[in-house]
Amino acid sequence: MRNRRRQRASRVTQIGWLCFVAAISWGELERPAHAHPLAPSLLELKELEPERFAVRFKKSLLRPAGVDVRPVLPDSCQGIGEPALSRDASSAILDWEVECPGGLVGETLRVEGLAESRTDALVRVAMSDGRVVQAVLDGSGAGLEVPARQGRFQVFVDYLDLGFEHILTGVDHLLFVLGLVLLVHGWRSLLTTVTSFTVGHSVTLSLAVLGYVEFPSRLVEVAIAFSIYWLAIELVRDESGRPSALGRRPWLMAGSFGLLHGFGFAGALSEVGLPAEEVPMALLSFNVGIEFGQLAFVVCVLLVSALAKPLRSRIPSALEQLPAYGIGSLAFYWFLERLASLR
């Protein structure tokens, strides 16, 4: 029994150090409040009449110092009147009108500053005849060339990409998934636990985005940080051979906290919204993108564990619990940081 616990602790140590080093390399210890990925920007143009458009640009107020995100419209578009600036709890919103001789079909829309801010932007163009064209832009510098019409498949691909990137850039969500992998022993139990987490966050993601439930985003971020801290405590208990009731039923913990993390996922999707004519498609593809990213992360963790197997016997026993304490310390720091932001 003691050797088995030591083997499990060595596995925790190896993969835990990988996680901790990754967090440092991404600069999250320097900016703990940004452990959750910044919300994507939204550039929306609605055709009011031929060649005249209402423009809305919404961007997160949380961004790296000295970095700005701004829209780039075609040179032919000229502003009409003064832009109106407004704010909500987490975003700045700029509204104005433009006149674009010849319309927007064949023109390219861009958003600058995405690479520097490590965010995406959803660009949406709504024509007066009901046609809607949209795309998710990233830091590659590519823009949206407005076609005459956009197919359903492109909507699926865009929201799939948005969900995939959201989970892989959310260090706090990944830390929680990592903790589940370290806590669970055996393929069957791991599959049940990860599936339970998936079901939990899928439920609240869907309900929140569709407007059936609502939870303050800042409180959600505080609670997510605390969920990671709680999971770190379970890891320490498991290594000592005294798991709690939740530690003995990790699927219950995963499902319960999955409901909480779903509100966090919904925050990013709510920022950009869903296309009115393709709500089920966009919601499904965003969720599938999250699951693909989550699965890819779990596979990478297990692969690293398998490759590092020869090193297990060389790890000093004094370091066995260090990764669990590292994850817990990082999570508690996020918790305090986010709690202070509620004032």
Image (cartoon, rainbow, N blue to C red):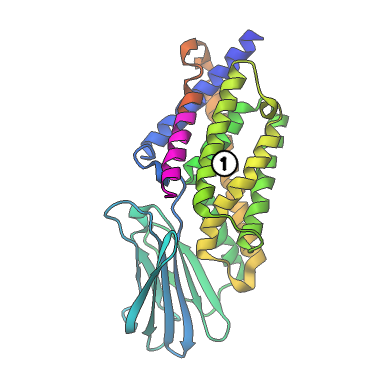
Left or right for 189, reference 16: right
Question: Which residue bears the numbered disc 1?
Answer: 296
List x then y, in percent, for residue 35.
44, 43
- Vertical placement of residue 181 versus 37, above or below: above
Q: Which of 183 and 15 is in front in this view?
A: 183
Residue closer to the observer: 242 or 175:
242
Q: Is residue 200 left or right of residue 94?
A: right
Q: Nearer the viewer, residue 129 or 253?
A: 253
Q: Give the quarter of the image for residue 208.
A: bottom right
Camera sees residue 165: no
Classify 239 as above or below 77: above
Quadrant in which the N terminus is drawn: top right
Specify start and end residues of the magenta stretch as a single range. Answer: 328-343
Tell me if residue 14 comes above or below residue 208 in the rendering: above
Quadrant position of residue 280? bottom right
Instruction: Assess whether residue 155 is covered by the magenta stretch.
Output: no
Q: Is 332 in the magenta?
A: yes
Q: Residue 46, percent across and down?
A: 48, 80
- Residue sitting at 49 percent across and 16 percent down? 311
The type of residue carrying mark 1 is Ala
